[in-house]
Amino acid sequence: MCADEAYDRIGYWSEIKLDILRKYASAYSKIMQKNSLHHVYVDAFAGGGRHFSLTSGELVPGSPQIALGIDPPFKEYHFIDLKETKIKSLREIAQDRADVHLYQGDCNSILLESIFPRIRYDQFKRGLMLLDPYGLHLNWEVIAMSAGMKSIEIFLNFPVADMNRNVLWTNPDRVDPRQRERLNAFWGDESWRGVAYTSQPGLFGEIAEKTTNQEVVEGFRQRLLNVAGFAFVPQPLAMLNSQNAVVYYLFFASHNQTGEKIVADIFKKYRKGGQA
């Protein structure tokens, strides 16, 4: 197996995300164990389990390896990826552990059909799920069902760079319909149009004027609260590259107020430029 195929190269903003995950997963697992709840970790876009850091030039733990090292441990781990090379790498990391389950394929169907039924609230199961797509590769149905189950908390990559590059153009009439459908699938319907654009009078009638990233992000946050039905969705954290451009926003959504308070505190420290 070629290491370049199994391991992605990540910038420091991704290392911040992994550090946030490590801190929250550790606190989450301790709380779940204290309350005698069977808790599960789910990684829908798991990758190869490790990454090459563009900052240090070294191999660093990815989210699956971080999750496997959390103490106290989760009761189950579910890792999904489309690529065979990454599943092979995950298998090497897991070392035949009986509590680790690997899936090669589309997470949108695997989550709904194979994993979510294992995390039922009425069976005293709870789950922490990382939804970290490279772009608009996630369906709203997954987000909505995770909220409806009441048993799952999520970290979600909101891929605003992909949205701006391929869909949210200044002139929306020039966008490829296939790209619009990708955003429809992620957002759940076409209501994003009313959030991303406002109508302004022009010489020849109404024209669409693009709104800001912040307005789009807030529109999605309200959707997580009022449409999906999560009880707590703190303001997401903007993940910036070396040019201070937003790569994506990291959302957290939960039905647990304690979880919301922990994440809000972690996000607050990173917004101030400190170390959480």
Image (spheres, grey):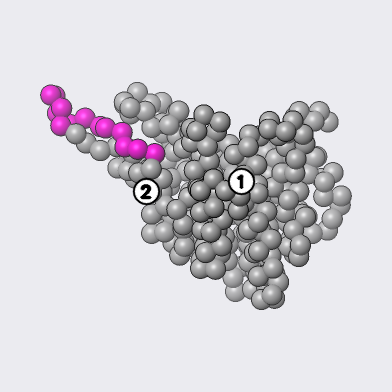
Q: Where residue 106 sits in the image (x, y, percent)?
A: 63, 42
- Between 148 and 212, the residue placed more toward the observer is 212
Residue type (three-letter) at the residue carrying disc 1: Lys
Camera-side residue: 119 or 251?
251
Residue 185 x/y as whole percent? 46, 42
Q: What is the number of the mark on residue 17?
A: 1
In-image side of 235 versus 202 (left or right): right
Using the image, tell me which numbered label, if any, was put on residue 219. 2
Task: Indicate which label's residue lies in the foreground, 1 or 2.
Answer: 1
How far, Cα to Cα, is label 1 from label 2?
Answer: 22 Å
Please say whether residue 23 is one of the residues in the magenta stretch: no
Taking the image as shown, residue 105 lies to the left or right of residue 253, namely right
Image location (x, y in percent) of residue 139? 51, 45
Magenta segment includes 205: yes
What x and y, as percent, mark residue 22?
68, 53
Q: Residue at x 72, y 37 (%)?
A: 51
> What kind of element bears circle 2?
helix
In the rendered structure, which segment of residues is drawn in magenta? 201-213
Q: Secondary structure at mark 1?
A: helix
Residue plotted at (52% across, 62% down):
260
